[in-house]
Image (cartoon, rainbow, N blue to C red):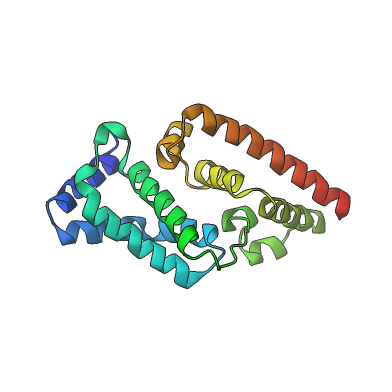
Amino acid sequence: MNHAIAEEQRLLALVASGDQGALDELYLRYHARLTHYLFQRLGHNAEWTEDVLQEVFLNVWYSAKSYQPQNGSPATWIFGIVHHQLAKAYRSRSRHSVTATLPAEMLDDVEDITQGDTEEAIVSRLAMADAFARLSPKHREILELVFYQGFTFEECARILGVPLGTIKSRMTYARRALLHEVEQSAREG
């Protein structure tokens, strides 16, 4: 077993026993990763992101006793909580307009795009961003979880609470949809 996973399992066991310091350590380990993910999923709304992040860690605090290592890594379990908190946030704040944008990693920093890149490379990245934004939320979600969060299909199935076959289908359709949207952007541009 990976040392980091074993350490996170130990931290969750401590959280389950009421150790606030262990929760603080998990928060430090996951804060940047979860903030990025939530920020993307919540339309770059920083306030909403912070609210949902706090709900996630309250949920971790109250449900740490339910974590079962045989059901997946702590990251998978925590992202499962994130998924449920996002669904709850969407329902309770439906008045917010959630726009989709390409994860920052796909666009790189603005400096990287403008320094040394050809016009064609810049246009290509912008077309990809536009194509990503036009995907359905389920397609954006699976691409984000697999390609940017690094989860396996099995872990995605646990996080989203759907069968593995559904994850594989979503990925197939997400890739096709992204290709279609990129081609559409190219025709329009």
Quarter placement of the N terminus: top left
Does any portion of residue 33 appear in the rendered image?
no
Quarter placement of the C terminus: bottom right
Q: Total number of numbered labels?
A: 0
Residue at the image position 48 percent from the left and 70 percent from the top: 46
For residue 165, side relative to residue 10 (left or right): right
Q: How far from the left and from the top, in percent, is residue 175? A: 66, 38
Nearer to me, 126 or 135:
135
Residue extending farthest to the top is 165
Q: How far from the left and from the top, in percent, is residue 103? A: 58, 55
Does any portion of residue 170 appear in the rendered image?
yes
Up/down of 65 relative to 115, above or below? above
Up/down of 71 relative to 55, above or below? above
Residue at the image position 62 percent from the left and 53 percent from the top: 106
Residue extending farthest to the bottom is 47
Residue at the image position 69 percent from the left and 55 percent from the top: 129
Residue at the image position 37 percent from the left and 42 percent from the top: 76
Nearer to me, 170 or 90:
90
For residue 48, side relative to residue 183 (left or right): left
For residue 82, side relative to residue 114 (left or right): left
Q: How far from the left and from the top, in percent, is residue 5? A: 29, 41
Q: How far from the left and from the top, in percent, is residue 96? A: 55, 68
Up/down of 66 relative to 19, above or below? above
Residue extending farthest to the left is 17
Nearer to me, 119 or 27:
27
Nearer to me, 48 or 113:
48
